[in-house]
Amino acid sequence: WPSLFAWLLTIAGVAAFCSLGVWQLDRMAAKKKFLTAFAEAPQSSPVDLAGVADITDDTRYPHVRASGHFVPDRGYLFDEQFHNGRIGDRVIAVFDTGADRLLLVDRGWMEWNHAPGTQSATPPLASSTDITGIYAPYPGSGIRVGGNPLPAQATWPKLTLHIDPKEISADLGKPVFPRILLSDPDAASGFVREWTPNVMPPERHAAYAFQWFALAVVAVAIF
């Protein structure tokens, strides 16, 4: 007959595993709700950038509006970005709102595989304008290999595999906002603008929930 310790250990384990499974299901539901809100954000009325500039909630991606002008002859090409199996760059512009910080604006994706003569001309910037888009955390760039490539480049736009706000601030000689603006879709822009937030997908939470519930079943089977 199982000992009291075996009973207590099994009950505690099953309770813990089931609790973690339910938690992952709750995370999945919350993530689905968040992704729906993110997809609908461009259709909502934009709020002024100044009101959310220093937002700290990583689950909020507000739709914002900013006034000012693009800084000419400054910008970055976020290299090796894929869309529908094709390689290209995300074109990052620098926008001056008149504040003490510069705003990085992701204009969207353009195809480029680095073959000679294959890079398309980047559409020109407006000199003075109002812009709208999703105010999002900077994109992740995976494992960092090598140092900062920006100081070694003398021509603009500069090519980089990382959008690091500290490195870009030093490169521009002025601080940048803590987030980047993902430009609203525009068929006439010349860019692909299909934004997805840099978060764990709901399907991953569902898989983790299955694993926790499976461990609960295994614990009962072992008992």
Image (cartoon, rainbow, N blue to C red):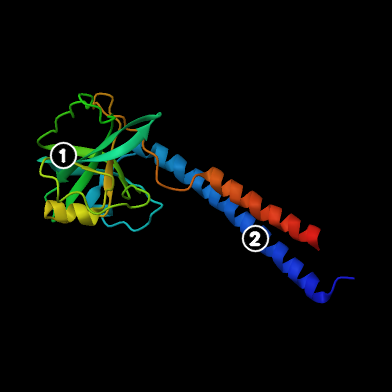
Q: Is residue 158 above or below residue 125?
A: below
Q: Which residue does the numbered mark 1 point to in the structure image?
A: 157
How packed mark 2 is, by other alpha carbons closer than 10 Å (few <14, some 14-19, many 20 or more), is some
Tell me the quarter of the picture where residue 196 sits: top left
Front-most of 141 and 190? 141
Name the residue located 54 percent from the left edge and 52 percent from the top edge. 27
Q: Position of residue 182 (x, y in %)?
A: 29, 40
Dot 1: what SS?
A: loop
Q: Position of residue 162 (x, y in %)?
A: 28, 48
**116 relative to 10 in the view: left or right:** left
Dot 2: what SS?
A: helix
**28 relative to 91 in the view: left or right:** right
Q: Amino acid at mark 1?
A: Pro
Q: Position of residue 193 (x, y in %)?
A: 32, 32
Front-most of 142 and 198? 142
Name the residue located 79 percent from the left edge and 71 percent from the top edge. 6
**Circle number at residue 119:** none
Q: Position of residue 139 (x, y in %)?
A: 33, 47
Q: Which residue does the numbered mark 2 point to in the structure image?
A: 19
Name the residue located 40 percent from the left edge and 42 percent from the top edge. 38
Q: Amino acid at mark 2?
A: Ser
Front-most of 215 and 57? 215
